[in-house]
Protein backbone atom coordinates (compact mmCIF):
# COMPACT_ATOMS: atom_id res chain seq x y z
CA UNK A 1 0.00 0.00 0.00
CA UNK A 2 2.98 2.31 0.44
CA UNK A 3 3.62 2.14 -3.30
CA UNK A 4 -0.08 2.78 -4.05
CA UNK A 5 -0.26 5.85 -1.80
CA UNK A 6 3.05 7.14 -3.13
CA UNK A 7 1.63 6.89 -6.66
CA UNK A 8 -1.66 8.58 -5.86
CA UNK A 9 0.02 11.36 -3.83
CA UNK A 10 2.57 12.07 -6.53
CA UNK A 11 -0.13 11.94 -9.20
CA UNK A 12 -2.28 14.52 -7.42
CA UNK A 13 0.68 16.77 -6.64
CA UNK A 14 1.71 16.93 -10.29
CA UNK A 15 -1.73 17.22 -11.84
CA UNK A 16 -3.03 19.96 -9.51
CA UNK A 17 -0.64 22.51 -10.99
CA UNK A 18 -2.53 25.19 -12.95
CA UNK A 19 -2.30 24.76 -16.70
CA UNK A 20 -4.11 25.09 -20.02
CA UNK A 21 -5.42 21.51 -19.87
CA UNK A 22 -7.02 22.03 -16.46
CA UNK A 23 -8.46 25.35 -17.60
CA UNK A 24 -10.01 23.67 -20.65
CA UNK A 25 -11.56 20.87 -18.57
CA UNK A 26 -12.95 23.40 -16.10
CA UNK A 27 -14.44 25.52 -18.86
CA UNK A 28 -16.14 22.52 -20.47
CA UNK A 29 -17.50 21.66 -17.04
CA UNK A 30 -18.88 25.16 -16.63
CA UNK A 31 -20.60 24.96 -20.01
CA UNK A 32 -21.76 21.37 -19.32
CA UNK A 33 -20.56 20.47 -22.81
CA UNK A 34 -19.10 17.00 -23.55
CA UNK A 35 -17.84 16.85 -19.97
CA UNK A 36 -17.61 13.06 -19.68
CA UNK A 37 -15.77 12.72 -22.99
CA UNK A 38 -13.28 15.48 -22.15
CA UNK A 39 -12.56 14.02 -18.70
CA UNK A 40 -12.20 10.52 -20.15
CA UNK A 41 -9.77 11.68 -22.86
CA UNK A 42 -7.57 13.48 -20.32
CA UNK A 43 -7.59 10.64 -17.79
CA UNK A 44 -6.99 7.89 -20.36
CA UNK A 45 -4.19 9.89 -21.97
CA UNK A 46 -2.53 10.28 -18.58
CA UNK A 47 -2.97 6.56 -17.90
CA UNK A 48 -1.28 5.64 -21.19
CA UNK A 49 1.65 7.97 -20.49
CA UNK A 50 2.04 6.81 -16.89
CA UNK A 51 2.01 3.12 -17.88
CA UNK A 52 4.52 3.81 -20.63
CA UNK A 53 6.73 5.70 -18.17
CA UNK A 54 6.65 3.06 -15.44
CA UNK A 55 7.09 -0.02 -17.60
CA UNK A 56 9.40 1.72 -20.04
CA UNK A 57 11.69 2.43 -17.09
CA UNK A 58 11.39 -1.23 -16.06
CA UNK A 59 12.68 -2.24 -19.49
CA UNK A 60 15.57 0.19 -19.20
CA UNK A 61 16.42 -1.28 -15.78
CA UNK A 62 16.56 -4.79 -17.21
CA UNK A 63 19.24 -3.53 -19.59
CA UNK A 64 21.05 -1.21 -17.15
CA UNK A 65 20.39 -2.08 -13.46
CA UNK A 66 22.44 0.88 -12.17
CA UNK A 67 20.01 3.23 -13.88
CA UNK A 68 17.65 2.94 -10.88
CA UNK A 69 20.13 4.81 -8.68
CA UNK A 70 20.43 7.64 -11.19
CA UNK A 71 16.65 7.68 -11.64
CA UNK A 72 16.15 7.96 -7.88
CA UNK A 73 18.38 11.02 -7.55
CA UNK A 74 16.91 12.57 -10.67
CA UNK A 75 13.47 12.18 -9.10
CA UNK A 76 14.60 13.69 -5.79
CA UNK A 77 16.26 16.64 -7.53
CA UNK A 78 13.27 17.30 -9.76
CA UNK A 79 10.82 17.10 -6.85
CA UNK A 80 12.84 19.60 -4.82
CA UNK A 81 13.00 21.99 -7.78
CA UNK A 82 9.30 21.52 -8.53
CA UNK A 83 8.44 22.02 -4.87
CA UNK A 84 10.53 25.18 -4.67
CA UNK A 85 8.81 26.48 -7.81
CA UNK A 86 5.39 25.97 -6.25
CA UNK A 87 6.41 27.58 -2.98
CA UNK A 88 7.81 30.56 -4.88
CA UNK A 89 4.52 30.81 -6.77
CA UNK A 90 2.66 30.72 -3.45
CA UNK A 91 4.69 33.68 -2.18
CA UNK A 92 5.00 35.69 -5.39
CA UNK A 93 1.91 34.68 -7.33
CA UNK A 94 1.33 36.31 -10.70
CA UNK A 95 -2.40 36.58 -10.10
CA UNK A 96 -3.45 33.83 -12.53
CA UNK A 97 -6.67 31.92 -12.17
CA UNK A 98 -8.01 28.75 -13.69
CA UNK A 99 -10.64 30.37 -15.86
CA UNK A 100 -9.99 29.54 -19.49
CA UNK A 101 -10.71 31.58 -22.59
CA UNK A 102 -11.96 30.54 -26.02
CA UNK A 103 -15.00 29.95 -28.16
CA UNK A 104 -18.17 28.97 -26.36
CA UNK A 105 -19.74 26.66 -28.92
CA UNK A 106 -17.41 24.05 -30.39
CA UNK A 107 -18.44 20.84 -32.10
CA UNK A 108 -17.74 17.51 -30.43
CA UNK A 109 -14.87 16.84 -32.84
CA UNK A 110 -13.25 20.22 -32.20
CA UNK A 111 -13.63 19.82 -28.45
CA UNK A 112 -11.94 16.40 -28.44
CA UNK A 113 -9.17 17.51 -30.82
CA UNK A 114 -8.53 20.56 -28.65
CA UNK A 115 -8.44 18.36 -25.56
CA UNK A 116 -5.97 15.98 -27.24
CA UNK A 117 -3.79 18.91 -28.27
CA UNK A 118 -3.68 20.32 -24.73
CA UNK A 119 -2.66 16.86 -23.49
CA UNK A 120 -0.29 15.43 -26.10
CA UNK A 121 1.32 18.62 -27.43
CA UNK A 122 2.36 19.82 -23.99
CA UNK A 123 6.06 18.95 -23.42
CA UNK A 124 5.59 19.25 -19.66
CA UNK A 125 3.22 16.25 -19.57
CA UNK A 126 5.99 13.98 -20.83
CA UNK A 127 8.37 15.27 -18.18
CA UNK A 128 5.79 14.64 -15.44
CA UNK A 129 4.26 11.34 -16.48
CA UNK A 130 6.90 9.52 -18.50
CA UNK A 131 10.19 10.75 -17.06
CA UNK A 132 9.42 11.76 -13.46
CA UNK A 133 6.76 9.18 -12.54
CA UNK A 134 8.67 6.52 -14.47
CA UNK A 135 11.90 7.36 -12.65
CA UNK A 136 10.34 7.36 -9.19
CA UNK A 137 8.57 4.06 -9.90
CA UNK A 138 11.98 2.36 -10.10
CA UNK A 139 12.28 2.82 -6.35
CA UNK A 140 9.32 0.48 -5.83
CA UNK A 141 10.76 -2.71 -7.31
CA UNK A 142 8.13 -5.44 -7.46
CA UNK A 143 5.40 -2.93 -6.56
CA UNK A 144 5.22 -0.95 -9.80
CA UNK A 145 1.67 -2.17 -10.46
CA UNK A 146 0.37 -0.61 -7.22
CA UNK A 147 2.38 2.57 -7.83
CA UNK A 148 0.93 2.80 -11.34
CA UNK A 149 -2.63 2.17 -10.12
CA UNK A 150 -2.25 4.98 -7.59
CA UNK A 151 -0.95 7.48 -10.16
CA UNK A 152 -3.61 6.52 -12.71
CA UNK A 153 -6.38 6.70 -10.09
CA UNK A 154 -5.25 10.22 -9.16
CA UNK A 155 -5.72 11.33 -12.78
CA UNK A 156 -9.20 9.80 -13.08
CA UNK A 157 -10.37 11.24 -9.76
CA UNK A 158 -8.97 14.68 -10.48
CA UNK A 159 -10.27 15.14 -14.02
CA UNK A 160 -13.78 13.85 -13.31
CA UNK A 161 -14.03 15.91 -10.12
CA UNK A 162 -12.78 18.99 -11.98
CA UNK A 163 -15.14 18.51 -14.91
CA UNK A 164 -18.30 17.60 -13.01
CA UNK A 165 -17.55 19.75 -9.97
CA UNK A 166 -16.63 22.81 -12.02
CA UNK A 167 -19.52 24.95 -10.83
CA UNK A 168 -18.54 24.36 -7.22
CA UNK A 169 -14.83 24.97 -7.83
CA UNK A 170 -15.06 28.08 -9.96
CA UNK A 171 -15.90 30.60 -7.19
CA UNK A 172 -12.86 29.31 -5.30
CA UNK A 173 -10.20 28.94 -7.97
CA UNK A 174 -11.19 32.03 -9.91
CA UNK A 175 -9.55 33.88 -7.00
CA UNK A 176 -5.71 33.96 -7.11
CA UNK A 177 -5.40 33.79 -3.31
CA UNK A 178 -6.63 30.20 -3.28
CA UNK A 179 -4.13 29.23 -5.96
CA UNK A 180 -1.41 30.62 -3.68
CA UNK A 181 -2.62 28.33 -0.90
CA UNK A 182 -2.79 25.37 -3.28
CA UNK A 183 0.70 26.09 -4.65
CA UNK A 184 2.03 26.16 -1.09
CA UNK A 185 0.42 22.81 -0.23
CA UNK A 186 1.76 21.24 -3.44
CA UNK A 187 5.25 22.57 -2.68
CA UNK A 188 5.23 21.00 0.78
CA UNK A 189 3.96 17.69 -0.65
CA UNK A 190 6.76 17.69 -3.21
CA UNK A 191 9.39 18.13 -0.51
CA UNK A 192 7.79 15.37 1.55
CA UNK A 193 7.74 12.95 -1.40
CA UNK A 194 11.38 13.80 -2.20
CA UNK A 195 12.33 13.11 1.42
CA UNK A 196 10.53 9.75 1.41
CA UNK A 197 12.19 8.87 -1.88
CA UNK A 198 15.63 9.64 -0.44
CA UNK A 199 15.02 7.14 2.37
CA UNK A 200 14.23 4.31 -0.01
CA UNK A 201 17.07 1.86 -0.57
CA UNK A 202 17.80 0.86 -4.16
Image: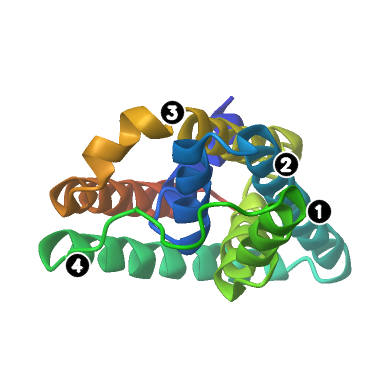
- Helix, strand or loop status at disc 2: helix
Give the Cα separation between the discs numbered 1 and 4. Answer: 33 Å
In the rendered view, tell whether residue 147 sits above or below residue 104.
above
Please tell me which residue is depicted at 75% across the width and 36% down the height of the picture. 145
**Along the line of sight, the residue nearer the viewer: 93 or 117:** 117
- Helix, strand or loop status at disc 4: helix
Q: Quadrant of residue 154?
A: top right
- The residue to which callout 1 is attached is 55
- The residue to which callout 2 is attached is 144
Tell me the crowding category of disc 2: few under 14, some 14 to 19, or many 20 or more residues within 10 angstroms, Cα based.
Answer: many
Q: Of callouts 3 and 2, which one flags the residue occurring earlier in the amino acid sequence? A: 2
- The residue to which callout 4 is attached is 88
Give the Cα separation between the discs numbered 4 and 3. Answer: 28 Å
Tell me the crowding category of disc 4: few under 14, some 14 to 19, or many 20 or more residues within 10 angstroms, Cα based.
Answer: some
Q: Of callouts 1 and 3, which one flags the residue occurring earlier in the amino acid sequence? A: 1
Closest to the camera, between mark 3 and mark 2, is 3
Give the Cα separation between the discs numbered 1 and 3. Answer: 33 Å
Closest to the camera, between mark 1 and mark 3, is 3
Give the Cα separation between the discs numbered 2 and 1. Answer: 8 Å
Say if mark 3 contacts mark 2, CB within 8 Å.
no
Q: Quadrant of residue 119?
A: bottom right
**Along the line of sight, the residue nearer the viewer: 71 or 16:** 16
- Helix, strand or loop status at disc 1: helix
Closest to the camera, between mark 1 and mark 4, is 4
Closest to the camera, between mark 4 and mark 3, is 3
Amino acid sequence: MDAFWAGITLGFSLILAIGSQNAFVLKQGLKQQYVFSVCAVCALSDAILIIFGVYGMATILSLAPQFSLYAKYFGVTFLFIYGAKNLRSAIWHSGSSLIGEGADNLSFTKVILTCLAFTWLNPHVYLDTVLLIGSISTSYAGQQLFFTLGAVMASFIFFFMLGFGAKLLTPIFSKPIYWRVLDGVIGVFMFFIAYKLMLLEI
